[in-house]
Image (cartoon, grey):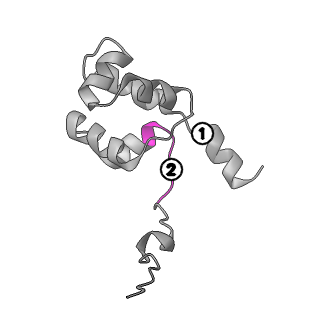
Amino acid sequence: MTQLESDEIDYDPNNLLDTLIKQLHLKNDAALSRALEVAPPVISKIRHRRLPVGASLLIRMHEISDVSIKDLRALMGDRRAKFRISDKQFKPKDTENNG
């Protein structure tokens, strides 16, 4: 089994979402989406693994729960020590000035 496959097996966003609902004393996913200020389908897509938990949502989870980013990542099974960001994100776009 490759490292990527084992990471996918460990990844469980439901644990993260369920823990937040419990900790914040919310009733359901709809209440969580209101607390996070996201549309309800976002939570559903995360639950069904059609949408990853993005950085901005992770930060929002931290803001409303006071749980550290590291602990939030651990709750969903993300055990990576560091995030890798593509160097393409920091390169300026090539633009031609024809004037």
Residue 24 as seen in the image, left or right of residue 19:
left
Q: Which mark is residue 79?
A: 2
Does the magenta portion include 87?
Answer: no
In the image, is residue 87 above or below residue 4? below
- Closest to the observer, 47 or 16: 47
Counting residues from the start of the chain, the first of labels 2 and 1 encountered is 1
Which corner quadrant of the image does residue 27 belong to? top left
Distance from the alpha carbon under mark 2 to that under mark 1: 9 Å
Three-letter residue code for mark 2: Arg
Q: Is the residue marked by circle 1 packed among few (<14), some (14-19), or many (20+) residues within 10 Å?
A: few
Of all residues shown, which one is farthest toward the bottom? 99
Three-letter residue code for mark 1: Asp
| Percent position of residue 15, x then y | 46, 28
SS for tag 2? loop
Residue that appears at 37% across and 26% down: 19
In the image, is residue 53 above or below residue 38? below
SS for tag 1? helix
Residue, disc 1: 10
Helix, strand or loop for the magenta stretch, by majority: loop
Which corner quadrant of the image does residue 43 belong to? top left
| Percent position of residue 48, x then y | 56, 27
- Check contact, mark 2 vs mark 1: CB within 8 A: yes
Of all residues shown, which one is farthest toward the front? 99
Q: Which mark is residue 73?
A: none
Q: Assign the C terminus to one quadrant of the image.
A: bottom left
**Bounds of the magenta segment:** 74-81
Does the magenta portion include 78?
Answer: yes
Q: Is the residue marked by circle 2 packed among few (<14), some (14-19), or many (20+) residues within 10 Å?
A: some
Residue that appears at 24% across and 26% down: 35
